[in-house]
Image: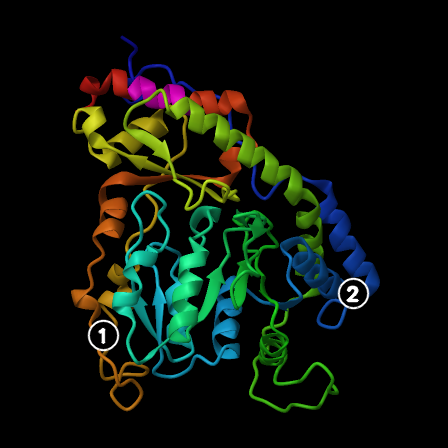
Amino acid sequence: MAVLAINGGEKVRTEGWPPWPPDDPGFLEALKKVIDSRVWGTGGEFTTQAAERMAEYHGAEYAVTVTSGTSALEVALRALGVGVGDEVIVPPYTFIATASSVVAIGGVPVFVDIDAETFNLDPTKIEEAITEYTKAIIPAHIGGSPADLDPIMEIGKRHGLAVIEDACQAHGAEYKGRKVGAIADAGAFSFQSSKNVCAGEGGMLLTNNREVFEKAWSQANIGRVPEGGWYDHRVMGWNLRMTQFQAALILRGLELLPEHFERRYHNAQYLRQRLEEIEGVSLQKMTHPSNRSAYHLYIFSYDRGAFAGLPRDKFLQALNAEGIRGGSGYNPLYREGLFRDNWDPNAFPFAPQFYKGKVNYDEVTCPACEQVCDESGFWMSQSTGLADEKAMDDIADAILKIQQNVGEIE
């Protein structure tokens, strides 16, 4: 029997992992172009080109550049008429911005459980959460894997609800042959440092609706309107404008994206095949067989029963010791301090003068999400997928080594 690395044995993987952001000279060249242009802030060619190329790549008519994915979600909500006291259905297994963006515009997040195999919002649980105050649904394409949009959009249409795709982790992902982000009423993308297209920070809203585009553009541009002048402020807006530096980095990232996407996808498919040999660990299930995940995260399900009852967190300690980077991931959002500790039913936007419904985050429970967060889910970062097939073999071999020697772990 091999000695586990956690007990002093040799690691399965001694090599490093690809760096992120990627080590690519094109980023420096892109920034130099901005410096040489002498247009660093708004109104330059780079933001215009980034919006056009992002929209074209994802099959959208319009794009609005903003400061972050969080800003893109907020702008999308306002542009679709969601406001103070309105309920918005969100998954609890996602980054905090999916829900905090709702609070930021005066809305009330309503948490609906996920599917424990796809890790995405469960469409079968949505309708029971709809009330007379519900105005929108935000499915998050978690880890870059598309949520099941068709039934979600059908529910939205039947109940008159806007659907906003949180595509912040899903650059280039495909749902039934269509790239995500412009399938629903609007979609939000992030270019934060960890994202598959990164610019340090930055965001973008995509839509095929001209009215939504114009409203979003105005909000991000201090209340100006697309056809108006520089000092023509017709509506309430904010300064959420992307700089030319961020846009230039995005343009280079979009050039790299197709190659990176295919490498992550190929490695994920290879790893998925290897894991079929190992009972108890599997990659995130797609919501439809033809979907293609962006694999911003490699998300796994872990069954402790196949590892002699070894708790997930102990398993992850052993896995990391073998040179394989993994983490447990999110907590259910309703357990975060924003909702569990600092939620005040007498403060904005939850106070009765703003919100006529009823919500109590202390009483929220989403069993599938809690199972994933507490027991069965774990991640590897997207840079994992930029390695090679040997790295995928190392992942599978390390898992198998732990399983075969699980009795060594105290």
Instruction: Please state which amino acid type lies under the numbered disc 2.
Output: Glu
The crowd level at tag 2 (other Cα within 10 Å; few <14, some 14-19, many 20+) is: some
Quadrant, the N terminus: top left
Residue 316, horizontal then vertical, whole percent? 30, 33
Instruction: Please state which amino acid type lies under the numbered disc 1.
Output: Val
Residue 272, horizontal then vertical, whole percent? 43, 29
Residue 160, horizontal then vertical, whole percent? 41, 76
Count of number-bearing discs: 2
Report the side of 395 relative to 229 (left or right): left
Q: Which residue is mark 1?
A: 359
Snapshot quadrant of residue 191? bottom right
Report the side of 15 relative to 330 (left or right): right
Residue 385, horizontal then vertical, whole percent? 52, 34
At numbered mark 1, what does the secondary structure look like: helix, strand or loop?
A: loop
Q: Which residue is mark 2?
A: 45
Q: Is residue 399 magenta?
A: yes
Q: Which residue is at 73% across, 41% downward?
A: 25
Residue extent of the magenta highlight:
395-402
